[in-house]
Image (cartoon, rainbow, N blue to C red):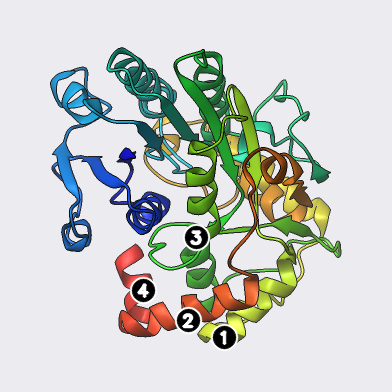
Amino acid sequence: MKALVTGASGFLGSHIVDECVHSGDAVRVLVRRSSDVGRLRTVPGIEIVHGDLDQPDSGPLREAVQGVDTVYHSAARVLDYGSRKQFERTNVTATQRLLGAARDAGVGRFVFVSSPSAVMTGEDQLDIDESQPYPARYLNLYSETKAAAERIVLTANGPDFTTCAIRPRGVWGPRDWHGFMPKLLAKLRTERMPDLSGGRRVLTSLCHCTNAARACLLAARSDQVGGKAYFVADREWTDVWAFTAEMAERFGGAPPSQAVPGWARDAIVSAVETVWRVPYLAHRYPPPLSRYSVALLTRSTTYSTKAAERDFGYRPVIDQRTGVELLEQWVNEIGGIDAWLEKGR
């Protein structure tokens, strides 16, 4: 295949590029001129097109999709702050623009990297499948705009244009500079992370970057995926607070210790979210706590991957123990934990 990958200078996008190359596909990437493409330039045969999906100039976009068989769209605004306009422009309008350009150019497949956050309710969701509806109220703008973009992509499916959405949960692994894992470790190493569990055991699904990228390629090669969304995750369910303590021990941090009562935690979140309604703060700075971030740490959310297994043969190829070892190996290769966290700041 000839593949176009967006978000290729980022975390998951870079692993999608790797999987494409390993599968023998020709790879083109669409990146901003300001993006760090140092690693991409080391990938043999890769073609780089400079363009910004946020901008209305369609020239680079037409060039990027020309002659392409499959588009993997992983670029997104994943931050926990910003204006509605910023989220809609990057996550919704940019997806519409790329989708239209791909369809007009005769691209046959469009794989959208979505998120389980699109159906997240803020309550426990154990072993849910794709029948879970979109919520009436979203926890944040990221969840809302990813859901909106996902629906646009799935609706665009047709006889000559196969579209699908892949929902990897909690992507982790090497080359994650700004995701949940380095943020978690930064807090653990400064000994500022309290135990917010409220005494509950919290289970979650995670998805190693290689498993997530492999799922995207498998979906692109299946005739069963048109117009559908799929959860993908590692085989194991993860105990959030036990895993957090393990990561602290492995990477030289302090495990969460001071327990915060549930009522106090919820009162703090309510106060923070009230203050963060001020546009100056909400548009520029991440909140210290939010309903979304607290839900990730205090509500069990696990996902069934049976549909992905049935429709495109998804099987996790990296188990959690191996994934942690590979992560530690990568951290050592880049100069250690301090070098990792410093670059991610």
Query: Could you tell which of marks 1 and 3 lies nearer the N-terminus?
Result: 3
Quick check: can you spot residue 345? no
Label 1 close to label 3 by CB (< 8 Å): no
Q: Real-space Cα distance between discs 1 and 2?
A: 8 Å
Q: Which residue is mark 4?
A: 340
The residue singled out by tag 1 in the image is 250
**Secondary structure beneath disc 4?**
helix
- The residue tagged 3 is 210
Work out whether mark 3 precedes mark 4 in sequence or the reverse, and give the earlier one. Answer: 3
The local secondary structure at tag 1 comes to: helix
Question: Is residue 272 toward the left or the right of residue 123 in the image?
Answer: left
- Cα separation, mark 4 vs mark 1, equals 14 Å
Callout in the foreground (1, 2): 2
Q: Which of the two residues, 136 or 75, is positioned nearer the viewer here?
A: 75
For the residue marked with disc 1, what is the amino acid? Arg
Q: Residue furthest right?
A: 200
Circle 2 packing at 10 Å, graded few (<14), some (14-19), many (20+), is: some
Q: Nearer the viewer, residue 338 or 323?
A: 323
Other residues around mark 3 within 10 Å, as few (<14) / some (14–19) / many (≥20): many
Mark 3 or mark 2: whose residue is earlier in sequence: 3
Q: Which residue is mark 2?
A: 328
Residue at image location 67% in from the left, 51% down from the top: 296
Q: Disc 1 vs disc 2: Cβ atoms closer than 8 Å?
A: yes
